[in-house]
Image (tube, rainbow, N blue to C red):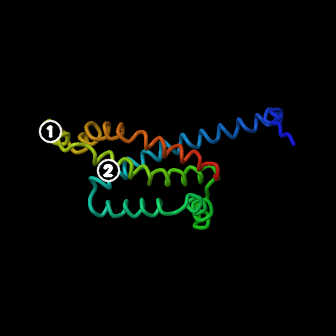
Amino acid sequence: MRIEFDFMAVLEQWPLLATGVAWTLGLTAVSALLGVAVGVACGWARSHGPVWLRWVVGTYVELIRNTPFIVQLFFVFFGLPAAGVKLTPEIASVIAMVINLGAYAAEIVRAGIEATPKGQYEAAASLALTRAQTFFHVVLPPALRKVWPALTSQIIIVMLGSAVC
């Protein structure tokens, strides 16, 4: 028995495939931008925030990282409308992907922040930089450079997870 690949079937469905690729890339891009922003904020909170915020963010991170993405998606897609929040399927997908990526990115970014040498903080203090200036100009850029490969891998995982959305 001989099996052949009929590429004409793919060409006939090309507009549908192109639309799917565009939606996947669009959902991934929006989710990546928002998810990394959430991850940076949560990473800061886990490493430099007040104790009560560390506890809240730690609970969020552990809860999201220990539940399957499909459960998170079902909660956003079915649970929020049951509570009176009306969402389009696209918005529900983005919210679920941002929540998921934000939790994973928080731990990735926290690791990068904690890998920053204490001398960097001392140098920023000697220049009389505020805590915000120290974080955004001294700590965050090298931290993101260190963790960029791990963040990229997590973004790709979210892109692959968009298939269930």
Amino acid type of the residue that numbered disc 1 sits on in the rendered structure: Ala
Q: Name the foreground residue: 84 vs 151.
A: 151
Q: Name the foreground residue: 122 vs 93.
A: 122
Q: Report the number of numbered marks.
A: 2
Disc ID at residue 160: none
* Percent of width and height locating residue 12: 82, 34
Q: Which residue is mark 2?
A: 44
Q: Which residue is mark 1?
A: 128
Residue at left offset 26%, top offset 53% = 48
33 sits left or right of 161 in the view: left
Q: Residue furthest left?
A: 126
Q: Nearer the viewer, mark 2 or mark 1?
A: 2
Q: Name the foreground residue: 120 vs 50.
A: 120
Residue at left offset 59%, top offset 54% = 92
Amino acid type of the residue that numbered disc 2 sits on in the rendered structure: Trp
User: Which quarter of the rendered picture does the N terminus lie within?
Assistant: top right
Residue at left offset 56%, top offset 58% = 69
25 sits left or right of 39 in the view: right
* Percent of width and height locating residue 53: 32, 60
Pointer 2: residues within 10 angstroms few (<14), some, or many (20+)? many
* Percent of width and height locating residue 108: 39, 48
53 sits left or right of 100 in the view: left
Q: Quadrant of residue 9?
A: top right
The tag earlier along the polypeptide, 2 or 1, is 2
Query: Secondary structure under badge 2?
Result: helix
Assess whether mark 1 and mark 2 are in contact (beta carbons under 8 angstroms): no
Residue at left offset 52%, top offset 45% = 31
